Image: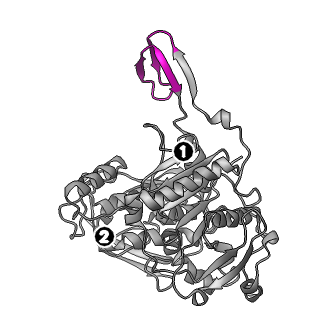
């Protein structure tokens, strides 16, 4: 079981090593300068029935270390914060009435020696549109400032909890012996490869893709931002634990990192600096790491708004393009969330973009961004006038990608009409004028 002492020992080792030894994780971890509006306070023992209650920020005073939970809502939510139970939750929250995933997340938090956790449906008043609007605009900050993001990655709802039974032996690499030289053909790419005789280990190159990227949580739109902006995430999959921070991606079978060739996304590249000011050994290392994740390449002129050649796109532009492709393949339960669920990532990149944000797109290099197309359609969600104009990819449902072809027109004028006051929030409509 992923609840075994051995599994927790590994998880705790990843967490402690990351916080103590990972230079870049410490570098990109924000200082304690932000406190969510509400947090759940935990006390007691993880193997007993801990006590929990809701705390307002003004009750805590200064910022405190806290964990977050990333999970799929599903259709089963037995207890949530409402206007009617807000005051009673300040006194005590009935642990046994919570979903199993909430109970397990609280236990993991306490076991990690963290006293506070943020859980969306327990920290946002669920029957208050005003509270939802206020909290949704800072969701990115909430996950970015968390000390650990606990992810129920392998489960479609909260009924199963975080832990899973498994046959650990079935996960281990398989030893094989090649008795003579052979030429093998890749069944997918039809490529031929010469293999010499000898002893080999057969590895699962899709373990991360299958258990994290394509898992139930990996297909949830909100989870892209939660995973991207948190410095470290502990994934509870259906088979084993996976660790993801800025410096390391690993699992119980490969606790020190995956073998070369393992298929995986790396959304935490959004936390990497996007400036050209890094020089010397540190700069070389940083650029090397960024190139490995496909986010290298800085424009010589980041100031003007015209289209850049694809290879000359700024790092921020390339990062946003990748985020759009990852995010657009995911589903949302509510159409109104399309722009809100990525607003934290947009805000993080806004200083580097140094231009106006336009319903999921940017005024700088807008011509290239307009070349998006749907490559994998999804069932349409009922539109509600919050997802922007038809020329933005946010207006459609389905995975999109940007075609890197020559543009034939220039944007002469563009305008979006906001639903509220937040430039990065919901958009009702927009106009676009092209010349060329």
- Residue 365, position as x, y percentages in the image: 29, 64
240, above or below 160, in the image? above
Give the answer, above or below, for where 268 lies relative to 251: below
Q: Position of residue 374 (x, y in %)?
A: 48, 53
Instruction: Please provide percent x and percent y for residue 19.
Output: 47, 62
Q: Look at mark 2 in the image and give the residue it sits on.
A: 352
Q: Position of residue 275 (x, y in %)?
A: 26, 65
Res 114 → quadrant: bottom right
Q: Name the quadrant containing residue 69.
A: bottom right
Q: Are marks 2 and 1 in contact (CB under 8 Å)?
A: no
Image check: 418 left or right of 239? left
The residue where tag 1 is placed is 208
Residue occupying the point 56% across, 40% down: 207
**How many numbered discs, if any?**
2
Task: Residue at 63%, 69% (x, y): give it.
Answer: 334
Residue span colored magenta: 178-201
Q: Say whether residue 285 is left or right of residue 400.
A: left
Q: Is any atom of residue 399 visible in this view? A: no
Which label sits on residue 256? none
Residue beneath the point at 51% across and 66% down: 395
User: Between residues 42 and 405, which one lies in front from this camera angle?
Assistant: 42
Q: CA distance from mark 2 to mark 1?
A: 31 Å
Mark 2 secondary-structure assignment: helix
The crowding category of the residue bearing disc 1, from other C-alpha atoms within 10 Å (few below 14, some 14 to 19, many at least 20), is: many
């Amino acid at each position: 079981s992923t609840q075994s002492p051995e599994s927790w020992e590994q998880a705790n080792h990843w967490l402690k090593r990351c916080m103590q030894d990972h230079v870049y994780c410490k570098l990109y971890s924000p200082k304690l300068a932000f406190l969510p509006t509400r947090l759940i306070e935990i006390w007691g023992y993880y193997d007993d029935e801990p006590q929990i209650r809701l705390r307002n920020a003004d009750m805590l005073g200064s910022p405190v270390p806290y964990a977050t939970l990333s999970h799929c809502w599903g259709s089963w939510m037995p207890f949530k914060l409402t206007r009617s139970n807000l005051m009673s939750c300040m006194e005590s929250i009935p642990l046994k009435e919570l979903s199993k995933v909430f109970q397990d997340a609280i236990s993991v938090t306490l076991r990690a020696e963290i006293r506070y956790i943020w859980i969306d449906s327990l920290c946002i008043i669920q029957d208050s549109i005003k509270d939802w609007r206020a909290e949704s605009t800072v969701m990115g900050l909430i996950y970015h400032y968390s000390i650990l993001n606990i992810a129920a990655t392998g489960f479609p709802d909260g009924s199963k909890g975080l832990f899973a039974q498994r046959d650990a032996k079935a996960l281990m690499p398989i030893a094989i012996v090649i008795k003579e030289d052979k030429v093998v053909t890749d069944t997918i790419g039809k490529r031929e490869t010469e293999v010499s005789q000898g002893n080999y280990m057969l590895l699962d190159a899709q373990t991360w893709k299958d258990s994290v990227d394509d898992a139930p949580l990996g297909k949830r739109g909100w989870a892209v931002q939660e995973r991207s902006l948190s410095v470290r995430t502990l994934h509870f999959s259906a088979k084993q634990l996976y660790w993801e921070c800025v410096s390391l991606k690993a699992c119980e079978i490969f606790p020190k990192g995956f073998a070369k060739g393992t298929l995986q996304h790396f959304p935490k590249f959004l936390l990497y600096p996007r400036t050209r000011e890094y020089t010397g050994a540190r700069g070389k290392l940083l650029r090397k790491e960024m190139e490995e994740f496909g986010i290298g390449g800085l424009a010589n002129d980041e100031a003007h708004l015209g289209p850049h050649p694809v290879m000359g796109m700024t790092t921020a532009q390339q990062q946003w393009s990748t985020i759009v492709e990852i995010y657009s393949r995911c589903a949302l339960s509510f159409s109104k969330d399309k722009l809100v669920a990525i607003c934290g990532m947009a805000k993080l990149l806004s200083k580097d973009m140094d231009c106006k944000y336009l319903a999921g797109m940017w005024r700088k290099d807008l011509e290239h961004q307009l070349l998006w197309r749907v490559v994998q359609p999804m069932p349409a969600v009922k539109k509600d006038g919050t997802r922007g104009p038809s020329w933005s990819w946010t207006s459609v449902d389905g995975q999109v990608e940007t075609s890197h072809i020559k543009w034939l027109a220039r944007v002469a004028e563009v305008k979006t009409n906001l639903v509220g006051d937040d430039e990065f929030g919901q958009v009702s409509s927009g106009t676009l004028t092209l010349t060329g």
